[in-house]
Amino acid sequence: MPQPIPYQGSKRSIAAQILTMLPTDIDTLVEPFAGSAALSIRAAYSGLARSFFLNDLNAPLMDLLSLIINEPDRIASDYGRLWHQQRGREREFYDEVRARFNATRRPDLFLYLLARCVKASVRYNAAGEFNQSPDNRRKGRRPESMKEDIQAVSRLLKGRTRITSCNFTATVQHLNPVTDLVYMDPPYQGTSGGRDSRYCSGVERSMLVTFLKDLNELDVMYMLSYDGRKGSKTYGGKLPEELKLVHAMIQAGRSTQSTLLGRQDVTHESLYLSPALIERVDSVAEKLNRIATWSSPSTQLEMALV
């Protein structure tokens, strides 16, 4: 799959399993917490939606996605220029670009930082400034390869994608409950209860639950990735029973964060399905079992009404 934006926590590796649950007649796939838009890119590649609505509170990230989709040659050229300028002084140049990005929020500078930072692991300080260090063993993705993926994503999404940067609750104003589906991948409960350096802003659990209730009242189809397990450690508690969600666990492979720490923990991601979605999807149990099969032959699917 083309993906010019390296982003730790992206659902790129399990997007196919998640999209198994989509009905066949979706008009717009809405991502209130779009991140690198990995799910929408996969859905567009597979022809699973006619249009896309990408939103994230991280404005530089949305500016970058907008350039990738609508002005691919420009952002590819800007990235290539930065990549070549670094040669021979990679560490000093990275620090200079990071300082310039924190002052200007320019998307081309952001793409360079994402391509060079340690394990694509975004980090912010208390002032909201990007402060992750570079991977000094690598120079970042080569411009030719980056350009290919940028152009590929543009071909998939240009002319049928709306991009905004606002609070996730505002996206409900643009929803058509009959034809649209919402996929949410907010900062996980248990990992971002307070300020978390991985996100420019956290999400209060109570606010998210209220939003889900609103979506239920509107009979909106939605899926939610919100918690899970890493090794023996569980993140987050169950969502309220009154939401009437179906809950599945997807094996997502070895934890990137654990790899950074020299451990071998395997991550299982939760996927919650809304009542309106369950009503529209044929043979829910069969599709959930397919998710388990794709995850790993040894994976035990966990499904329950929560």
Image: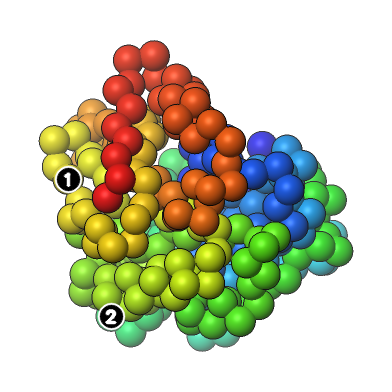
- In the rendered image, residue 26, in percent from the top left (x then y), is placed at 70, 52
Disc 1 marks a residue whose amino acid type is Thr
Q: Nearer the viewer, residue 286 or 170?
A: 286
Residue shown at the point (21%, 74%) measured from the top left: 194
Nearer-N-terminus badge (2/1): 2
User: Would residue 174 be seen by someone viewing this image from the given angle?
Assistant: yes
Left or right for 170, reference 306: right
State the mark number for residue 234. 1
Q: Where does the N terminus fall, quadrant-wise?
A: top right
Mark 2 = which residue? 126
| Disc 2, SS | loop
Judge whether 53 appears above or below 84 on screen: below
Residue shown at the point (36%, 31%) measured from the top left: 251
* Classed neighbour count for the residue bearing mark 2: other residues with Cα under 10 Å, few (<14), some (14–19), many (≥20): few
Disc 2 marks a residue whose amino acid type is Ala
- In the rendered image, residue 57, in percent from the top left (x then y), is placed at 50, 76
Q: Give the residue at the far left of this rendering.
A: 232
